[in-house]
Structures are given as C-alpha cells and as structure tokens.
Amino acid sequence: MDYRDYIAKKLNTEGVAASDIALPPNSEMGDYALPCFKLAKLFRKSPVQIAEELKNSFHRDEVISEVSAVNGYLNFKVNKAGLAAEVLSEIENAGDAYGSSAVGNGKTVCIDFSSVNIAKPFHIGHLSTTVLGGSLYKIYKFLGYKVIGINHLGDYGTQFGKLICAYKKWGNKDEVEKGGIHAINALYVRFNEEADEQMEAEAREYFRLIESGDKEANDLFEWFKKLTLDYVQSIYEKLNITFDSYAGERFYTDKMQPVVDELKKKNLLKESEGASIVDLEPYGMPPCLILRSDGASLYATRDLAAAIYRKNTYDFYKCLYVVAYQQNLHFKQVFKVLELMGKEWAKDLVHVAYGMVSLEDGAMSTRKGKVVWLEDVISKCVEKAYAVINEKNSALDNKEEIAKTVGLGAVIFGALYNNKIKDIVFSYDKVLSFEGETSVYVQYTCARANSVLAKNGVKVKLPKGYEPNAQEFEVVKSLAAFPQTVLDAAEKYEPSLIARYAVDLSQKYNKFYIDCKILTAEGSAKDFRLALTKAALQTLKNSLSLLGIGVPEKM
C-alpha cells in the first residue's frame, strides 16, 4: 500500500492528491511530505500557515505516528512495522500483478505509435515512438484499460508509384524476396538518384493505377507491404511490441470524402489559392490544409478521418498519438478542426510528443546519405553486452541469451529513461554500464537478489511485528511507492517515471544489501531481509516488464 493515497484521503483537503505527496530527501524529516506552496494561491495564505493549520487538524492514528510542519512542508512519520508488513504481504500476494489496478476497467485507450513506412527499413529515429508507445500500451493494460495499439502505416503516396517503376526497370523477384526490405529500399534510392521527367511521369501513372484498383499495381504494392511487415515484425518481437491494428493511411481512402462533406456542410471549408482549408488564424494557427488545388488529400485529411473512425469503432476514453515534437502544430490543427466540427471528444485526443534520438557521432536517421538502421543498433548492443558479460563472468551459462536480454533492455531503457520530450544522445558504453542509471544496473540488482534467495534455499517467511532499521525502511517506502508511480506514468504519458523508479529502488536495495547482513543474520532479521529481497526483486521485475524489458536470473 502506498501511504500517499492514505494520507491524501485522510487530509481530505481541496487541491491535494496522492501524487502531490512526496518522499522527503532526508528521511529524518519524515517518511512522506506535502509541500504546501501550490496551495498558497488556492487558500490565500502562506505555505507555512497552511502547513501549520493542516498539522493541527490532522488526527494521528495507528498508521501515522507523527505529523510536523516545517518551512511550508507538512511531514508525516508512519508506523514502520505496520507499513513494512502490509507492503511486503501485498507484494507476496499480488506477485506479477503488484502495482496493477482496475482504474481503467470499462475504458478504452487507443495508442497510435511506431507508424512505419512501407518499403522503408526501421531507422534509429523510429526507436522512441516504438518503445514509448509500447511501454504506454503495457502500462495502460496493467491499469485495467482495454488498449488498442495502432500502427498507422505510411502506405499512401506517389513514392509507391516510384517503387513500382524502379522494380519494373531494375528489379528481380528472387533478389527482392531474398533481400527483403533492404532490396526494396535500394530500388527506391536508385530511382531518386536516376529519375528523369519520363520516369517521374511513369511513377505518377503507377500510383494512379494503384488508386484506381489496377490488379498488377496493387499486387506489387501488397507484396512490398508484406515484405515490410515481415521485416518490422521481427524487430517488434525483439522489442516485445504488439499491435491490434495495422490500419494505415490507405485504409482511410474512402473515409475522407465524408469528412470533407461535413466540413463543407458546417461552413468550415474555405478556398485559398485553389486549395481547400480550414481557417485557424482566429486561434493563433496557420490554416489547416484539407485538399490541395488538384483535389489531392493530405496528412490532415487522413488524420481527421482516422480520428473519427477510431471514435466510432472503439469509443475511446483517450486516443494517444506518439509522434515527434516536430508535429506539434499539425496535431494542434487537427484537434482544433475536430473541435470546430463539434466533436466534443476532441478533448480526449493527446499528442504524446518526444524528442529526437542521435548517436554520439551526431548521426540520426541519415548522415551523408547513409541510414542508421535500428536493427544494426540492436545487434551492436547485443554484441557489446556479450563482450561485457563475458569479461565479468566468463563461466556464466547461456551467455548468448543473457546478452540478448541485456542488450535489448539497454536499447529500450536508453530511449525511455529521460523525460520523453528531451533529445537523446545514444551511447553504447553508457547504456551498457553496470553502474549508474541503466537497465543493466537494474538487471544486475535483480540477479543479485536472485542469488541471495537461491543461496538461502528455503521458503521465505515474513516475521510479525518486525521494526525495520533505516536502510530496510528506505526500501520498504520505495516498494510502497510503486503503484502510485505506475498511475503517475499513465497520467503524464511518461514511462521515464517507471524507469527512474527502478533505478532508485535498485540503489536503495543495493545500499541495504551492503549495509545489512542477510544470509548471516539471525532470527526475524534474516526472515525480514529475505522477504524484503524477494519483494524488491518482484517489484523490479514488474517495473522492467512495463518498459518491455526482461530480467535474466544470473549475470
């Protein structure tokens, strides 16, 4: 149980939620603290006065043993033995479900993420949207929501006419089957390098044939699509990512005209230089382009159709778009147009923006025309993980499998540890460090806890009435905070909260491990420390699982 929720309910004060109650940096001040500064405006009093008044009105009980007001903070001390027994018992009983909730029961969340382009390999720029969306998918499911993962495929546009043209000129079926996505991409690159006016015209004609239902053109397109999805599926499996829908841009071809008709009917569509727009200047935005002067649809047209389709199909509670921050304006425009159309659910659309990923040499998706493929980043991480593991423990069994778990975990954690909006500089050495804020450090902590439990060899039992010491209680408080951390991560669309939590819990457990004897302790101290170890291991596993990361038993 997280006592922040207990304290918030007991305070029963306007403007105070469980997430407002923090863990003080110095445990001597208290086990939990409420900063009263943000309440000053609400109550029109100083934080010091608010803290003092709340202290005087708070009734102590068998759970909260002491309340104090210090410099605008309301500090709480809890009954250590009671909290420890309750938290460890809850983790023991819940197991893999510890931290889960029924808060989302009866609600559906759609998550649009990854959104790969047909005929183009995954590059490192796809990393953040894929693992961020994948983690949010797991977090919402853990909280009881029905989750619909949507891969909004980039499968519409003249580039497919170019690809068919290139294949017709230079392609070989057997070579493309063998080379897969990279063979397709090579043909596309060659087209862009060698195309003249005649080839561009041919490409436009092939795209027209796709749109008009021509069998040969569509058979080729579907073949390219299958080769792409076979390729990306292999990466999704490695990253522990699943989707429920692959409805891409092309899926909405017949669903855009009703949107255009509705915009006309509601007098929202205006003509500007031959194009059809929705004027958003009164709302501080440039116009939203709906149709080009030649009548062609655009991204906004398809996204409007997609949003309406998703609401009608899934009746979502929220629909998240995990897309880079460069698209901030695009989504503001789309959401505003839906609002102007009278879609009251437009408020439930959320752009989960994230920063860019680059390698240490500055490379991103392309550098001097060379693409940095995500599969190469993954392979390199696994290779480096194997080298590190082999150096530290050459006698370890199943080193190859462990290296895969560690290497893949490092890729995912490296993209999720920082606040999502921050740009990331991906460093192989940093993400694979056994020390510091890495998944490897958390996984190693799990291996350490596993080793302790394996050496003990008997069933762990929780002693009654045990009073934890300072180091033990720091771990207990951290364990108690996990359920609220998961809720906070969902509310803020921020898996980094769970990643940082896992590192913090690992640090607290390792300090306890070093300072307190476990296997050589006696009586109730030994029993409690083994139970604490088991609980820490379970909670770390649950944390990493929500990020899509596995845990090897040994390292």
Image (spheres, grey):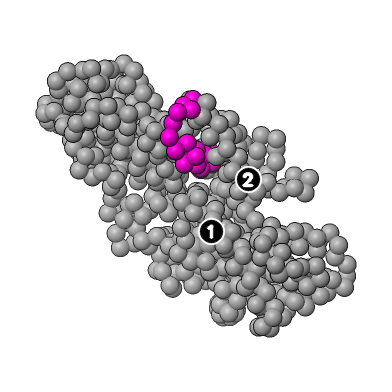
Q: Give, as a single range, the part of the protein colored magenta.
A: 392-416
Measured along the vertical axis of the image, is residue 522 above or below residue 14? above
In the shown orientation, is residue 52 left or right of residue 366?
left
Q: Residue at left 56%, top 77%?
A: 255
Check residue 301 in the rendering and tell me which mark sits there, or answer none.
none
Tag 1 residue: 233
Query: Is 82 included in the stretch rendered in magenta?
Result: no
The CA distance from mark 1 to mark 2 is 16 Å
Instruction: Name the residue nearer the viewer: 375 or 356.
Output: 375
**Local secondary structure at mark 2:** helix
- Res. 10 image quadrant: top left
Check residue 376 in the rendering and tell me which mark sits there, or answer none.
2
| Percent coordinates x, y for residue 159 in the rendering | 72, 67
Q: Residue at left 76%, top 62%?
A: 187
Measured along the vertical axis of the image, is residue 245 above or below residue 524? below
Instruction: Name the residue nearer the viewer: 105 or 69.
Output: 105
Pick the quarter of the image with the C terminus: top left
The amino acid type found where label 1 is placed reads Gln
| Percent coordinates x, y for residue 462 in the rendering | 16, 31
